[in-house]
Image (tube, rainbow, N blue to C red):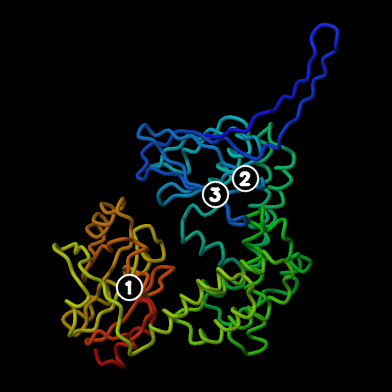
Amino acid sequence: MKIKSFLLSLGCVLFLVSCNKENKTEKVDYVLFSGTVKNAVENEIKIYGDGNNFGQTIVIKEDGTFSDTLKIDTKGTYGFIIGQERSSIYLDFGNQLNLSIDVKEFDESIKYTGAGSDENNYLAEKLLLQESFLSEGPEGYKNLFSKDAKEFKNEALKQEQAKNELLKKFTNINPEFVSIQTSDNHYEYLSMINDFKGNHAYYTKKTGYKTPAGFLDELTSFDIDNSKDFESSQAYRRLVMSVFDRISSEKADADNIPFDKAQMESLSKIKSKNIRNILIKNIAYQVSPRNDNAVELYNMIMAASDDEEFKSELTQQFEKVKQLVKGNESPVFNNYENFAGGTTSLNDLKGKYVYIDVWATWCGPCKAEIPHLKKKEKEFHNKNIEFVSISIDKKAQHDAWKKMVTEKELGGIQLFADNNWSSQFIVDYGIQGIPRFILIDPNGKIVSASAPRPSDAKLLDVFKELKI
């Protein structure tokens, strides 16, 4: 462990000559981070910073302990990941933090001691408080955003106030942290207000829903171009991205242009190079087989970005997109473990259409599609189609995969990919988010590299057109 220390420079002449002492203190730019992890499935903790590209992995020893030095450029809220679980952590120069956590009761068990512990214990309790607001899970989220605009805004205000009240519980919190968190709590409130229209329309099925006049007045003066807050505040980053998407959506509707094109045109409002680069990278996810506008979008991004490394990576991604058009030979997978026994390759399934679901046991949206997938598989049983589910769980989650297949009574062909996200089939299809559905014809050629989900009524239209 490399620890910087105070340097003492002494120049002394004994007896008759006086001794002058000068202390020279180097800048403290690190955090000492240690602790104990119980029931860890994986032997590492990953620390990351969304706004400053920080990343460091700490090894968890066999006895569950860990210890390392985190050299940071900026103080602020970072994140840490253990297995599939994650939480926030506040890092300040010179902190000596000790974390105690039980992975089986992840959020509930987080406890910090040492310098900076009050700030981090607040973040841990704030997360539990936020979870209590939506204790009913997805149904609670639906109920919240189904409220009328006035009632929803009152509820959002109550949540902001509750998080601010929680701050008062901790007496040793740095005043600067209190100021930052108060701002973050307001950013989170504004995010809820900004997202209300789309979520309300979705849950209430009100096509063309518009919020009452003045509902978004609090966002009128919001500065979308604050580079300092963007680097230090996750709440601000999320709000910027959310507001940017709303502005772009409104522009797309007004100008009758594709959403991604409206996003690129909206970039002219952003002066901060860092914010522009992050937004461009988010937009670049739409350079995919599911986007009919992928070629034009790729060209626009290449013209707008000055990040040569990113542009090189995007070009590689774009080359894959061009290879995944309808009628091309599909990439293949070989010898994936089959839950029913043995292994299965894509070539084993030639002669039938193949509808592939790429998923993982930790993926909420993937699990939400399971009932719809089971229904489609039952409906088209004994037809000229195979339903294949490929799990990209890590090897450490292998038992969790087998357990879920059994407990959920998953049908079709259940396969386990050979190297999770780095599996060649996943890489060849440019999959960066799940669930992802792929449809291949009986000759092994691509019908759709991004097929409709089982819950989408359009899937039946595709099957009907193919006479499956």
Q: What amino acid type should be assigned to the residue bearing mark 2?
A: Ile
Q: Position of residue 309 (x, y in %)?
A: 55, 68
Label 1, label 3: how many angstroms apart (C-alpha)? 34 Å
Dividing the picture into quarters, in which one does residue 50 lie?
bottom right
Q: In the image, is residue 299 above or below residue 311?
A: below
In this rendering, which labeled residue sits more in front, label 1 or label 3? 3
Circle 2 — which element?
loop
Quick one: label 1 or label 3, which is nearer the N terminus?
3
Q: What amino acid type should be assigned to the residue bearing mark 1?
A: His
Specify the label residue 372 is tagged with.
1
Label 1, label 2: how many angstroms apart (C-alpha)? 46 Å
The residue at which mark 3 appears reads as 79
Q: Nearer the viewer, residue 126 or 427?
A: 427
Q: In the image, is residue 294 above or below residue 51?
A: below
Q: Position of residue 326 (x, y in %)?
A: 36, 88
Circle 1 — which element?
helix
Dividing the picture into quarters, in which one does residue 115 lie?
top right
Residue located farthest toward the top when viewing the structure as drawn: 15
In this rendering, which labeled residue sits more in front, label 1 or label 2? 2
Residue at left offset 27%, top offset 62%: 418
Q: Position of residue 381 (x, y in %)?
A: 19, 79
Q: What amino acid type should be assigned to the residue bearing mark 3?
A: Gly
Quick one: label 3 or label 2, which is nearer the N terminus?
2
The residue at which mark 2 appears reads as 72
Quick one: label 1 or label 2, which is nearer the N terminus?
2
